[in-house]
């Protein structure tokens, strides 16, 4: 099965528990044989791109915003 996680925070730059939860879920589903993809945001343009971390495909999109605007600028906003 192919599984996609969308989360604004993902390690190593995660600032909250949600990033750790997604990391743990991704690892465990990968161990069960699933194909895992994670789409996350990155504030540093140099870190933007696609890479594989322990068999998990991570897509980092640049999105720089103040935490106050997360509801309008985060991944849950269709414009992003």
Image (cartoon, rainbow, N blue to C red):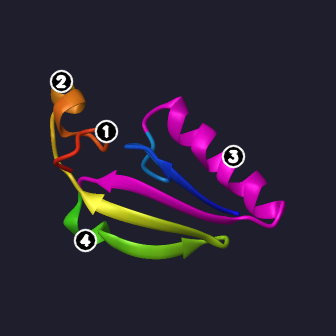
Tell me which numbered mark, 4 or 2, is placed earlier along the sequence.
4
Q: Residues within 10 Å of mark 3 (few under 14, many from 20)?
A: few
Q: Residue furthest front?
A: 1
Do labels 2 and 1 touch, CB within 8 Å?
no
- As drawn, the label of residue 68 is 2
Q: Residues within 10 Å of mark 2 (few under 14, many from 20)?
A: few
Left or right, residue 38 beside residue 20: left
**Residue position marked by numbered label 3 in the rendering:** 24
Q: Residue at x 18, y 39 (%)?
A: 73
In the image shown, does 10 or 72 lie closer to the viewer? 72
Whether residue 64 is situated above or below residue 77 in the rendered picture: below
Q: Quadrant of residue 59?
A: bottom left
Magenta segment includes 38 = yes
**Residue position marked by numbered label 4 in the rendering:** 46
Task: Determine the CA span between mark 4 and mark 1.
Answer: 23 Å
Task: Determine the CA span between mark 4 and mark 2.
Answer: 24 Å
Task: Determine the CA span between mark 3 and mark 2.
Answer: 27 Å
Task: Determine the CA span between mark 3 and mark 4.
Answer: 25 Å
Tell me which numbered mark, 1 or 3, is placed earlier along the sequence.
3
Kindly report which numbered mark, 1 or 3, lies closer to the viewer in this rendering: 1
Q: Residue at x 16, y 29 (%)?
A: 69
Q: Quadrant of residue 61?
A: bottom left
Tell me which numbered mark, 2 or 1, is placed earlier along the sequence.
2
**Residue position marked by numbered label 1 in the rendering:** 76
Tell me which numbered mark, 3 or 4, is placed earlier along the sequence.
3
Q: Residue at x 67, y 70 (%)?
A: 54
- Magenta region: which residues? 15-43
Q: Residue at x 36, y 63 (%)?
A: 60
Kindly report which numbered mark, 2 or 1, lies closer to the viewer in this rendering: 1
């Amino acid at each position: 099965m192919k599984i996609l996680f969308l989360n604004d925070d993902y390690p190593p730059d995660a600032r909250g528990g949600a990033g750790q939860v997604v990391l743990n879920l991704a690892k465990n589903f990968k161990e069960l044989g699933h194909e895992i993809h994670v789409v996350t945001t990155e504030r540093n343009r140099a870190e933007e791109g696609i890479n594989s971390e322990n068999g998990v495909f991570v897509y980092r999109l640049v999105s720089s915003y103040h935490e106050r605007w997360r509801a309008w600028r985060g991944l849950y906003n269709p414009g992003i």
